[in-house]
Image (cartoon, grey):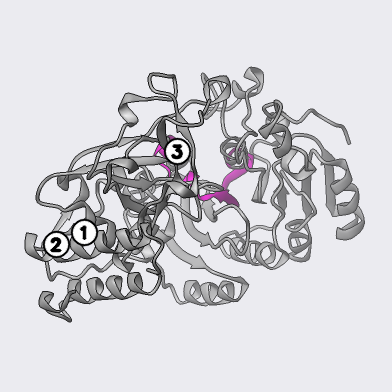
Amino acid sequence: MHQLPLIATPPTKRQRERHFQRREKVLGQFFTPSALATWAVEQAIRWIDHRGKALDPACGDGAFLRPLLSAGFKEVWGIDVDLILLTQCATRCGGGERLKLQQANALAVLKELQGRFDLVVTNPPFSAKYGRVNEKRLLHQFELGRGRSSEAVEALFLELCVKALKDGGVLAIVLPEGIFANIPQRRVRVWLCRHVTPLAVVSLSRKFFAAKSCVLFARKEPATLDAPVLLAHAESDEDLAGISRLWQEGKGIAKPLLSLLLSDMSPLHHLKPVQLPQTFPLRPLGELAQGLRGGATEYGAKRQFVVSGIPFLSAKTVTPFGIDLRRDERFVAPNSPMDKPSARTRIGDVLFVRVGVGCVGRTAVVLNEDETGVADDYLYILRFRSEMLPEFFALFAQTRFFRQQLENLKRGTGTVTVPQRLLKEMLVPLPPKDVQERFAFAYRNLHERYRRGESAQNLLPELIAQLENLLEGKVDVKTVH
């Protein structure tokens, strides 16, 4: 055994220092539940003919090593940078001479691993927020890292796993959902298509990992346009057996490979198509918006607030009842670095929270002069054309039809976000103006009651229910009050 240095961006003070206080954060560790690891090995074995050598290049606590040994592989290799975990693996896994453990950063021993394994099964470190690889010597060894100043560690592990396989070998790897769905990660999916044929992708709920993840199964062989890809979603361990049965029956979603992978290969995007009611015309949000831009702010020494001045509009101030500055009373000085002209709002603007697991998609209208201000970079500022009333949109954003679309638009792993390009594609119903005005009046009335401190908690669900029924054609607009 030998030790090689962990390649990761060194933490600086404050937020990064706090982030890296825990050892698992330093090493990017998200340990795999044993049930998921066993299931992944069992599924991967379905696609291989020879149980020779198997590898987990980030073996952690040995979750994959144990089922690999039980499956009868002649050699099972485990590599990890964490000596403590490797020592535990040696005791826990058994395996005798069949188990080969090595202490190393697997990325640094790529050449020793290439083309040697029939099966690679792993849950590599996730870069999460700060753990990107930035060592030039190491980046140069990888096609996905060459010429870049840094790269997500999981992307480099994906390339390592593919290169470690023999031709025809099979890969099963847990990756953050961003690899499968994020627009900037399209180049990773392009690279993947050039080297393997994806066999299946399984989306995992956050019950498995804190970070939204997927499992990719792939074979190292040239990809073809008509190769089918099996898609599934697992909400919990109980779903895994059901997925296996469906696959054994040949059930899944088959799509043209490249068109699926290059744009979006996240299963939920394809498994849960949104069925919007056709009572009113549906228009892409981008056609209804006169403008859509992001807020802006400063960080570090320039991030300064004052006792009074221009209200600072953050995600906290955006509520289902409208803007509420009492939830985050901060102000910026006029003409200071925090006073961003492009982030200034006016009456009628819609603020959309673009990021955050718990608050992404929250929407509110600026209805009063004292609610205008400078929008944080966590917000989008939407300004609609005359055919769409902003108050109506703010209510539509609280319906299940909006939330269903939002689930397909979310991108990211630990912290989810909605890209502007995808938000513009969201379909919005466009009722006649008099229909919109009835709901706009109700929204403004609700907001005023909320500002006065009157109870409005029970009124909002009733209003949203009326809107959903109207969109489905179940009620007449005359019943809205």
Q: Position of residue 214 (x, y in %)?
A: 53, 55
Of the numbered discs 3 and 2, the one sitting upstream in the chain is 3
Cα distance, mark 3 to mark 1? 35 Å
The answer to whether residue 167 is magenta is yes
Q: Residues within 10 Å of mark 2 (few under 14, many from 20)?
A: many
What amino acid type should be assigned to the residue bearing mark 3?
Gln
Label 1 sits on a secondary structure element that is helix
Q: Which residue is mark 3?
A: 185
Q: Position of residue 55 (x, y in %)?
A: 71, 48
Mark 2 vs 1: CB contact within 8 A: yes
The answer to whether residue 107 is magenta is no
What amino acid type should be assigned to the residue bearing mark 1?
Phe
Please give the name of the residue rendered at 33% of the width and 73% of the height, measured from the top-left corner. 459
Label 3 sits on a secondary structure element that is helix
Q: Quadrant of the C terminus?
A: bottom left
Q: Is residue 306 left or right of residue 394?
A: right
Q: Residues within 10 Å of mark 3 (few under 14, many from 20)?
A: some
Q: Which residue is mark 2?
A: 436
Out of 367 and 38, give the one closest to the viewer: 367
Tell me which segment is drawn in magenta.
162-188
Q: Is residue 240 visible?
A: yes
Q: Is residue 25 left or right of residue 198?
A: right
Label 2 sits on a secondary structure element that is helix
User: Looking at the picture, does residue 48 appear above or below residue 313?
Assistant: below
